[in-house]
Amino acid sequence: MRDYFADDLLLIMPATNSPGVRLSGEVVSTHRGPLALALTDQTQAHGNARSQDQDQANDILLDLTGVRYLANSGLETLVAFACHLRPPQCLVVRATAGLGLRERVAARGWDRIETLRLEDD
């Protein structure tokens, strides 16, 4: 990732303490490309990472705690990204309950994706 992406609605920045990205604002359909690029860059940058905690080294964090709105197209983008990961890699999506991700993911059967994990903030 080139450090960050910003427009009138969304800011995407690298996560500070782990491989991944942090988003703030509103994610709409025009953000599919920048979101996919940011996640892919983090995967490539940290794909060979080694640490004492191997599980954490395989996790790619998507921090949505600063997101007020997530369009279905954004959700589909992150699910598609997770589907392309190979275990033990995993996309860890951290979000507030207000986005309703657990319900939205379960309604589509995506809660069974091994490489996607939701965390509440």
Image: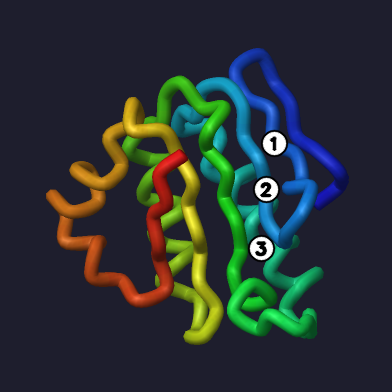
> Neighbour class for label 2 at 10 Å: few (<14), some, many (≥20)?
many
Q: Are marks 2 and 1 in contact (CB under 8 Å)?
A: yes
Q: Which mark is residue 76?
A: none
Q: Position of residue 111 (x, y in %)?
A: 24, 62
**Residue that numbered label 1 is attached to:** 12
Q: Earlier in the sequence, mark 1 or mark 3?
A: 1
* Number of numbered markers: 3
Question: Which mark, residue 21?
Answer: 2
Could you tell me which secondary element the residue under label 2 belongs to?
strand
Q: Position of residue 15 (x, y in %)?
A: 73, 48
Q: Label 3 neighbourhood size at 10 Å, few (<14), some (14-19), many (20+)?
A: some
Q: Residue furthest left?
A: 107
From the viewer's perspective, tell me whether residue 13 is left or right of residue 10.
right
When the figure is inspected, residue 66 is found, relative to residue 75, above or below; the finding is: above
Query: Of all residues shown, which one is farthest toward the right?
Result: 2
Q: Is residue 17 left or right of residue 9?
A: right
Q: Which mark is residue 40?
A: 3
Question: Which of the two residues, 39 or 92, is positioned nearer the viewer here?
Answer: 92
In the rendered image, which quarter is residue 8 located in? top right
